[in-house]
Structures are given as structure tokens and as C-alpha cells.
Amino acid sequence: MTLQQMEYIVAVYRLRHFAKAAEYCNVTQPTLSSMVQKLEDELGVKLFDRSTQPITPTETGKAVVEQAWKVLVRARKIKEIVAERKHSTTGTFRLGILPTIAPYLLPRFLQSLNNAHPEMDMHVLEMKTDEIKRALVRGEIDAAVLVSLENMEHFVQTPLFYEQFLAYVSRNDRLFERQTIRTADLNDEFLWLLDEGHCFRDQLVKFCNLKSARDSKAMYSLGSIETFMRMVENGNGVTFIPELALHQLNDSQRQLVRPFAIPIPTREVVLITTKTFIRHTILDILADAIKASVPKEMLVLNNTEQRV
């Protein structure tokens, strides 16, 4: 039994597909399948039911994969300890990021970071908050960019920046004539909102006490901020965008943006790791690159903003 075989079975378990697992592990499918088969022969059990699509683990397979996962995490820690003692930035670093942050933040820093540190193999995965927490605990990612929320005391948070919520209002909507939006103005509006589970949505619903949230969910599920922006531009209603999205809008789109009245709802974007995280050299470089990429006024919470 080898660490490589453990990596293969974990990949098959996660992706539920031999070809996808092989691609993820950067090997051919015959190679991966052969190594998994050899491990099954050695153990004398079937780890996966290959007759189902997607591939499913057997009961024994689930237990074996769970243990393999723990072994791989501990083995990786050994390499990380050595790398950190050398202040090395080489090797793979897996970064989770919220889908409501990724399209607006990544273009601002990722390419320049890669250019400055070509030896750093940064893998970025878009994930929701709950997925990020699980992935951190299980060692599937090294760190994550997300929004500071309650019940995160099990993680270490590095503050990055503060980002206002902005309303995006159709020209046909009665609120288009307003210069600012009050939370009370939204209760009779049709709102294009993300599904529950997106902290961007959940924070707004809580802050604004939105009664229209249910109507939006009934009409459109699994939407994105960009999709809802197109709906507003071509129809009616209101959606919400993060402050960094403002810098990607053209002049016509900027005319649809309305700030909230004071106090302005604002989210704190942070970089989080587990308490056993080791590779602080890379983390510091990453945090500095992100903070350098956003407008300076977003690095502090001003007195017109309210953290939600």
C-alpha cells in the first residue's frame, strides 16, 4: 500500500469517476485503474462499485478512504514543515474562494502573483462557505478567501478588506430615481437573490429583513450575481452586487448602481486557515498581494459602514 494509491482512491471517491480522477491526479486512466485494482487485490476487498454511474464506494471502501485521507493529510504535513522551515514557496497551494468574491477579486491579483512567484503552484477552487469549512478540516484545501461570519472560532482569520453591498436597480423600477436605497424601500420590490447558503444573500436578507426573498427563490434557483445583473438590465426588479464588481462595470451599467443609505451594509473579507496550518510564508505573500490589489479605502471599516 503506497501513498500514491491512497491519493488515487481518494480522488475516485471525491470525483466518482475514474477518468476525472486520473485527470485530477495527472496520470492516465489505465494507470490509475491498475493501481486501484492492485490495492483492492492487496486488501482482498472491493473499494468501489464499478457497475454504477457515478462510481460509488462500497461500505468498506468508505472506511478505507476515510483513513487514507487522514494518512495523506499527515504525510503532507511532514513536507509542509520542511518547506516552511526553509521559507519555501514551492509546491501546490490550494485556495478556496467564494463564488461571490472570485470573479471580482481574482483578476485583480492572481496573474501578478503568478508572475512574481512562478514557483508557486496555486490551485483555486470556488466553493460555498460550508464547503470551504469542510474542505479545510479535511485537508482538501490549504486556505480560503471568504466572509467573516459567526461560529468561525475553530479557524484562524486574517483580515483582508471591507466591501460594501450595492443595489443594482432596473431603469423601469421605481427605485431608479432614488439616490440611495433604504432597507425599508426593498420590502415591496421583486428582488433577484442568490439561493440560501450563499453568505452574500443570507447577510443581506438578515440586515435588510427582506420579505421578498421567498418570491425570488420561487422564480429562479441556482442563479449567479452576473445572471441577475442581466435580468435587471433587461427587465425590472433589483439585485445586489459587491463593491469590487463596480470596477468592472461600463458607464451604462454604473447608472444602475445605488448605494445603501447610512449605515451601509458591509462585509469583511478574510483569509482563513485551520489552527494547525503551517505554510505561513505563502499565506503572508498571498494576503499582501490581495490587500495591495484592492482600493486603499477598502482596507478599513469607515464610520458610515456597518459590518454585517
Image: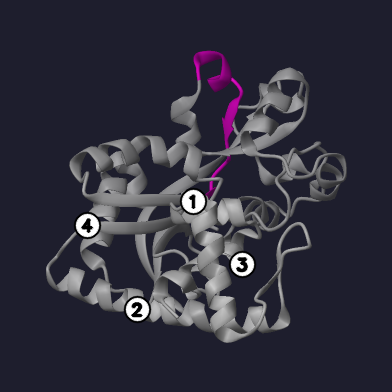
Secondary structure under the numbered disc 3 in the rendered image: helix
Compared across the picture, whether 252 is left or right of 287 comes to: right
| Residue that mark 1 sits on | 28
Q: Which residue is located at x 60 percent, y 33 percent?
A: 180
| Residue that mark 4 sits on | 90
Secondary structure under the numbered disc 4 in the rendered image: loop
Q: How far apart are the alpha carbons under marks 2 and 1?
A: 24 Å
Q: How far apart are the alpha carbons under marks 3 and 2?
A: 19 Å
Mark 2 or 1, nearer chain start: 1
Residue 202, compared with residue 102, is above or below; it is below
Mark 3 or 1, nearer chain start: 3
Tell me, for residue 75, which label it has, or none. Answer: 2
Compared across the picture, whether 244 is left or right of 151 comes to: left
Q: How far apart are the alpha carbons under marks 1 and 4?
A: 25 Å
Tell me, for residue 268, which label it has, or none. Answer: none
Tell me, for residue 13, which label it has, or none. Answer: 3
Q: Which residue is located at x 31 percent, y 51 percent?
A: 121
Tell me the amino acid under the disc marked 2.
Ala
Q: How far apart are the alpha carbons under marks 3 and 1?
A: 17 Å
| Label 2 crowd (10 A; few <14 / some 14-19 / many >=20) | few
- Give the quarter of the image for residue 58: bottom right
